[in-house]
Every structure is written in C-alpha cells, then in structure tokens.
Image (cartoon, rainbow, N blue to C red):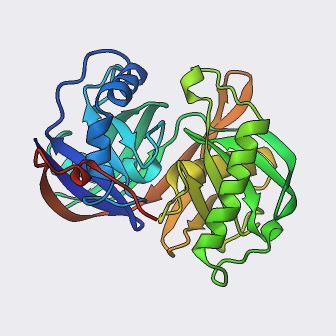
Amino acid sequence: MTLTVVDMHTGGEPLRIVTGGYPAIPKGTILEKRAYVRDHLDHLRRILMFEPRGHYDMYGALLVEPDLPGADLAVLFMHNEGYSTMCGHAIVALGRYAIDEGLVAKREPITIVNIEAPCGLVVASVEVRDGKAGAVSFESVPAFLFARDLRVELPVHGMVTFDIAYGGAFYALADCRQFGLEFGRDRVRDFVDAATALTERAKRDFPLSHPDHADLAFLYGTILTDGSDEFSSEPTRNVCVFADAEVDRSPTGSGVTARLAAMHARGQIREGQSRLFESIAGSRFSGAVARPAKAGRHDAIIARVGGRAYYSGKAEYIVEPDDELGRGFLLR
C-alpha cells in the first residue's frame, strides 16, 4: 500500500491532501460518497490522520469526482473522529492548490474555483498575480442562527448561555468568560475541556435539523469567543474545538461563517461590513456578510471568508504487512 499526499496549512491548521493511493469511489451524490468512504475506506483515514504519520489534530482532504453541475472539484474532509461537512481552512488551501495543479485554468487577477463540499457548493476566489496563486476567499453556503440564548447547567462551570449557528456545520457559540477563561492567559487545555463539556451537553439536550439533508444535522463542536461580537475594527478572538476534542489552529472558516450568521441575526454586523477573526495561535481570517439568503424557514446569510494557505511538504506513506501500530493509533 502506498499513499501520497501534499501537506499545506491555513493559519497554522494542517491540511493533508490525498494525491494517490485511494481506490476509485463509486458514483453518487457527495453525501453518498462520504458514506461510502466512511463505511468502506476508513482504515485509510486512520493511516493518514493518526500516529505515526499524523497526530490527534491532523486534518485531511480527499478529492473525489464532483456531482453538482458547475463544480470544478469535490472534496471529502477527514479528521480524528470521521468526516465533516464543511471546512473553510481546507477550502482556502484547495483554492490555491487547484490553481497550482492546473485543476482550474488560472486567470488574473481573480480565478474562481467552484468546490463541492458535503454541505453544498462553495465558491472560492483566488488572487492570481504574475501567474502565482495567493490569498483566497470563499462564499459560504447559506448560514444561519439556529437557536439563541440557550442555557445549560454544566457540572464544573455552572450555568452557561450559548447560541447554535450553522456555517456549513453546526457549532455552539459561547463567551469564554462564562467559564472563567481569558485568551492569552489560560491554557489551551482549559479551553478544550470547557468547549468539550458544552458540546457533549448540547448534543444530548438540543436536537438539530437542517432543511437540506438529515446528514448535515449534527453538532460539530463548540467555538469559545472573547465575547466581542459587536462590530469593531479590532479583531475578535475565538477557538474552535471540534470532532473528538480537536483544536483548530486557524480561526475556523466554517466557524467564522457561523459566527457571522449569529452576529448578523443579532444586528451586530451589517451586510458589507468586514471583521477580523483571530485564532488561538494568532492567525487571522477576514469575514464579511456578502448578502442575505434563505435556508428553508431560516433567514440566512452568505458569508465571505478570506485567508492564506501555504505548502509545508509532500510525502509518500507505506504500511508494512506486519506493522499493527502503523495502521494508526492516537495518544494525547
């Protein structure tokens, strides 16, 4: 078995793009492809995401044949727990990758790359100068505030108030100060523990629904913010803890989208206004409300989120027949 990859990162968050070694994926919708890979090829995710080749917080992308009309490429996202429905940092990286690999013909100053994700079609705009791809922004699928001012009692932290918003995936959004936390002072581990406690409780107590497909209706994680939701020229900080307590090093593209949807629904940001979002690692994405939209019965927005991705390497991986640990394990 030989698997080949290109590694990139967006705002510090890794993206391992599979370039070879996977068998052909049967035709079908993107959600059917996602289910097939989950049910039949999950051992390959473990090999690439888990140790000794990856780590607890590794993230990956598998390019598959698009099904939607107009899509230039389609992608399945993978992580320590399974397969997500949207990943903004991956879209930023794949926008640049598509230009560099000739998957889409480059045009200056902007090349459009239509990327089919499990949540729908995401439109990436790639800056091209002197033939080289640079910064990337994308327009999201319709994003919306699903529920506001929810309250739960957590064993260690007491009563916590939070929202649930959708930005291609569902997130709980909560002010970190409710947990006694402050960015730049407290340990990442403390943020992870607080976010995980809220995610687990919210999953249990608050069922979700999505107007397009039941497969999209699950809580992906929790985003703890600095509470700076009112529009400002200053950046607002957040950390996203998703899947099985995985920590996003970037501001989280789908998370920024969800935050923008919640902020717009609360009247804290208007169409056309732009805000900077800063991650726990210090990297930044820009975010703006591009225009209003609808998602079933929900008033929604189309968000525009921008960032920059970089290459970090290429690799060829093998698994020897008698190497049991080489099939993937995790320690944390």
Q: Position of residue 259 (x, y in %)?
A: 66, 52
Give the answer, above or below, for where 145 lies relative to 307: above
Q: Residue at x 46, y 44 (%)?
A: 81
Depth check, front residue: 161 or 50: 50
Q: Is residue 269 visible?
A: no
Q: Position of residue 232 (x, y in %)?
A: 71, 69
Give the answer, above or below, for where 301 lies relative to 36: below
Q: Taking 106 as reference, is 66 left or right?
A: right
Q: Position of residue 318 (x, y in %)?
A: 12, 50
Q: Is residue 58 visible?
A: yes
Q: Taking 1 as reference, is 89 left or right?
A: right
Depth check, front residue: 281 or 112: 281
Query: For the image shown, how many numbered marks are present on the structure?
Result: 0
Q: Taking 290 as reference, is 19 left or right?
A: left
Quadrant housing the N terminus: top left
Q: Residue at x 33, y 15 (%)?
A: 28
Q: Residue at x 47, y 66 (%)?
A: 249
- Figure quadrant of residue 50: bottom left
Q: Position of residue 75 (x, y in %)?
A: 33, 36
Residue furthest to the top: 28
Depth check, front residue: 136 or 184: 184
Give the answer, above or below, for where 163 lies relative to 32: below
Q: Taking 315 as reference, is 139 left or right?
A: right
- Figure quadrant of residue 115: top left
